[in-house]
Amino acid sequence: MQHHALDFATLVVGQVVEGIALAFRVERRHKRGGEPFLEFRLRDKQLREVRAVKWDVVDGEEYTCPTLLYVAATVKEYQGKRELHVTECEVCNGDIAPYLPGPYRNDNLAEFWDLVDSIRDRGLTALLERAVETFSDFLTSPASAKYHGAYREGLLEHSVNVARICDAAASLYAGAVDRDLLIAGALLHDIGKAGLHPVHAPDQVHPDERLFGHVLRGVRMVEDLLAMADDIDDERQAGLLHLIASHHGQPEWGAAVRPATIEAWILHHADQLDACVTGARDLLRAANPDDGWVWFPMRESLLRVPATNASSHPDGPERWDPFLNSRDDPEDVPF
């Protein structure tokens, strides 16, 4: 039997619905009396998300996410939001790609190579080419688990955006900035995130993130690349490693050291700027204009939703309660 895809924008309280959605998170929980139930986060093809619960759980009923599910459910309202109370649920075969968010632009790879080609130091150019050959996950990995760019090519897009901001700063402060070093560092600053977050489930954390963090991991990766390079002088090698080690700005934010060069300060602020703007865009992409304001976890503040915002979520994004929610993963700093 051919099932249609669910459209969460059309949900009406009291309605009985059935169709296909992507389950990207499933958690087995327990009622007050101890009986188990399943809590789902479901997504439709327009990237809208809803909470769903299945109160009657069969022994051994488990789901590996992300996966497509056929669900039959009744639309209910809980704490002012619509949710699905699932009565029937089964795994479906199919392509999950239409249910996954993607980059904002489709020219990120071309932009990357344009920036590489603009570097006059052939040693740095060769290093960047070798980086892509060695760590191919860099081109497809998400930029983070949840805060910004948590989608396919998010890391590439973030790296290109940061490099473009740095390029503008290098032009503004011409004569005071080593542009070649800055652009190379901007493109490589988050290479330690390559392969850390699966494309189809970016909130899953690689053990290296917990053991080392992406900053130290990135320094090690670039050290390995530099060990194969004989055409980059020692001062530039040190400068490049410093850019990666210091780009989070403060040790309490995950930096190995504080920025100690003009290039490092520019990179730090460019990284913050793109992470915050992209994080806000990601949040607004799913926001309901009727909300007016949404909680912006990256800055622990409110973010205004424009009246013309194109809604892709029936009730707005999941609220962040600063008193109840804590940063429970190693990605404590959102950039």
Image (spheres, grey):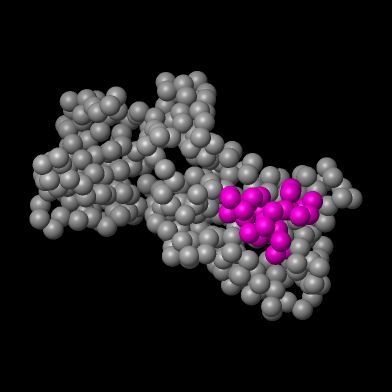
- How many labels, in total? 0
Above or below, comparing residue 271 to residue 245 in the picture: above
Residue 290 locus on image (x, y percent): 42, 21
Is residue 164 among the parts visible in the rendering? Answer: no
User: Position of 297 compared to 94: left or right?
Assistant: right
Above or below, comparing residue 216 to residue 226 in the picture: above
Residue 102 locus on image (x, y percent): 48, 48
User: Position of 160 compared to 144: left or right?
Assistant: right
Q: Residue at x 70, y 50 (%)?
A: 267
User: Position of 313 compared to 256: left or right?
Assistant: left
Q: Residue at x 57, y 66 (%)?
A: 217
Corner quadrant of residue 86: top left
- Closest to the observer, 220 or 41: 220
Above or below, comparing residue 314 to residue 258 in the picture: above
Q: Residue furthest right?
A: 175
Q: Residue at x 30, y 55 (%)?
A: 65
Residue 5 locus on image (x, y percent): 28, 42
- Closest to the observer, 327 or 92: 327
Residue 49 locus on image (x, y percent): 34, 38
- Closest to the observer, 187 or 205: 205
The verdict on residue 318 being magenta is: no
Q: Residue at x 52, y 64 (%)?
A: 212
Is residue 173 among the parts visible in the rendering? Answer: yes
User: Position of 177 compared to 24: left or right?
Assistant: right
Above or below, comparing residue 81 to residue 145 in the picture: above
Q: Which residues are magenta?
A: 240-266
Corner quadrant of residue 104: top right
